[in-house]
Amino acid sequence: MRYFLFLMIFLTSTSLWAQKDYQTTQDISNKIKKKYREAFSSYNAFKYKEAIKQLDKIQKKAPRFVNAYLLEADCYLLLKEWEKAKACFEQALEIAPDYKPISHYRLGQLAMQSATYVEAGQQLSLFLEKAPKNSKLRPAAERLLADARFRPQAMANPVSFQPQNMGPNINSHQREYFPSVTANEKKIVFNVLIGEGRQAQEDLYQSFKVNGEWTPAKPLPEVNTPENEGAQSISADGQYLVFTVCNRPGDYGSCDLYYCVWEGQGWSRPQNMGPNINTGNWESQPSLSANAQALYFTRGGARNQGDKDLWMSYRNLDGSWGTPQPLSELNTDYDETAPCIHPDGQTLYFSSEGYPGMGKKDLFISRKGEDGKWGAPVNLGYPINTEGIEEAIVVGLSGELAYLAAERAGGYGSLDLYSFELPEALRPKAVTYLEAHVFDAESKANLDQALVYLIDLQAQDTVCAIRTNAEGKFLLCLPLGQDYALHVKEKGYLFASEHFELSAANSRQTPYQLPMPLQALKTNPSKTDSVAPILLKNVFFATNSASLQPSSRAELEQLRSLLIEQPKMRIRLQGHTDNEGEQADNLALSQRRAEAVRQYLIERGIAADRLEAQGFGESRPIADNNTAEGRQANRRTEFLPLN
């Protein structure tokens, strides 16, 4: 029994000795403690080299005193002597493998810095295995571990990236960054940092593409001030500019979003976007949707403190902006910044430090799903993303060309603007655009402030509602994959409509350029006044049938609204067909179709005696019936105002 008791005592003491074959501040002599406190005081006084000398002396006296190695490692980290810091952490772990798991975390950080990702993964995994569950460093360690696993894979599978410096007309010895472009990619607006140090301030510059070359960039005189005009976004039509203003008296927060409108010869006076957008926090880095109906931006804490997140707001029909909502599917506990919504309305590019990446911040792409939620972000890949900070990419309408700011050898300054061909897998949905000119059919006078509606025919939703500019013009982006109705109306005029069939796989991508003359309403028409029939381009029937398709509703409601606004107006609804089939059958079909439209209006409150219906069959073609396109044009419904 005594032998057994002795053996247990021996094993227990041996086990305890093996578990703690090192010293902490509780185990050392008072003399060593005093020396350690002196070293710690030097450390707190930022005298890191002096602290290291003191710690080296302590280690000679107490070679198993682990805290001395850990404090010395911290000193070397602050002096940016990475290899020496690594050696100290490794020595601490050799002495006491389980004493301070943070050593594994620091070694993981150093390995990430030296791009030794296998070692980084091992050290970070050990930290997560040993650290307490409530450790505040756990989220950061998990994020670093994800980076350690992502980076070697990304580098082994690089994406195509051949950036082209945009040249001396854009770039200079100053810093150029945060670009945005119009839909036709013939105008670019960007930020330039003027001056150095405390005297530096941001201004907005613009350049135009003429004959394939960018003109010398010039400042925006109506916008720029001696203060900062920061990150900005220009609308697809070049008519609306949103930008950042900081530390201006009377604003809501440290940085607010402002806007101005193009007035034909220059920009309007900048205006604060108001309390629906701006708060006591930091609002910046705006991105306008193609038709300026949605605004994406970055919001941080007061005075740019705290995490930054992505937010967005929809524009109301009266031009005001709705209450912004965070992009919850994309925001993380880290910074998400610099959103760029592509004109397709479905593809968002942004910068984040919260997802696995190559550096502190990487560029990502997210696509909106059919449920309206943003999908999981995808890293744009290496070498678009590097070990540095990538922020603020903008992608042109075609999706082929992207623009970003970068510091590269051979540039003109520390930060230049570059363009590059975006890899196929990272491109947005195909988009085309419409440029139209609205004017009086007789006088040819521009009709500014005419109301323009773009409607998704399948959903019967208004995609956007805008007004023509001072020149009677407007530009709208049209994402492929959907069919659209376009309605243009102005007080005192008959409305006009267009139809865009872009749902087919081989849809046209060439931009549309259309004249859109509006016929003035005759207040006291005479019998000699001649008015051309108004083509209802978005009234559809089932094949060989007079049954109206649901997609006709938006157009017919426009006609109904016109008749309500003009209570004395009488119209004749006219049906037409192509020349396929029997002439008598075509005449009867056209009559039934005209009657179907008349009945739709009667059922919705329009008096029957104001509506006539007449079918003309194939007798009045407006195109060649020998082509499919011509026959489609001849199958039409019109209305004619009557004297």
Image (cartoon, helix red, strand yellow):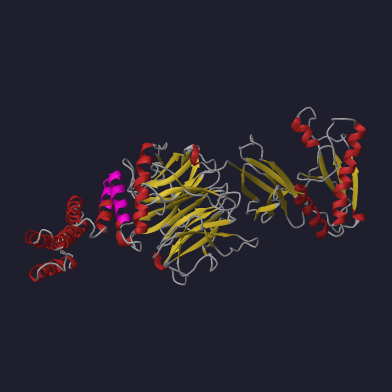
Q: Is residue 418 magenta?
A: no
Across and down, in percent, residue 119 comes to 27, 46
- Please tell me in which quadrant of the rendered image residue 577 appears: top right
- Please tell me in which quadrant of the rendered image residue 240 appears: bottom right
> Dividing the image into 4 quarters, which one contains the N terminus?
bottom left
Frontmost residue, 146 versus 160: 146
Frontmost residue, 278 versus 410: 278
577 left or right, relative to 338: right
| Residue 569 visible somewhere in the drawing | no
549 left or right, relative to 262: right
Frontmost residue, 531 versus 236: 236
Q: Which residues are magenta?
A: 109-129
Across and down, in percent, residue 56 comes to 10, 59
- Please report the residue visible at 70 percent of the width from the left and 49 percent of the height from the top: 439
- Please report the residue visible at 90 percent of the width from the left and 44 percent of the height from the top: 614
Across and down, in percent, residue 401 comes to 48, 40
Magenta stretch, overall SS: helix
481 left or right, relative to 363: right
342 versus 195 height, above or below: above
Across and down, in percent, residue 447 comes to 69, 53
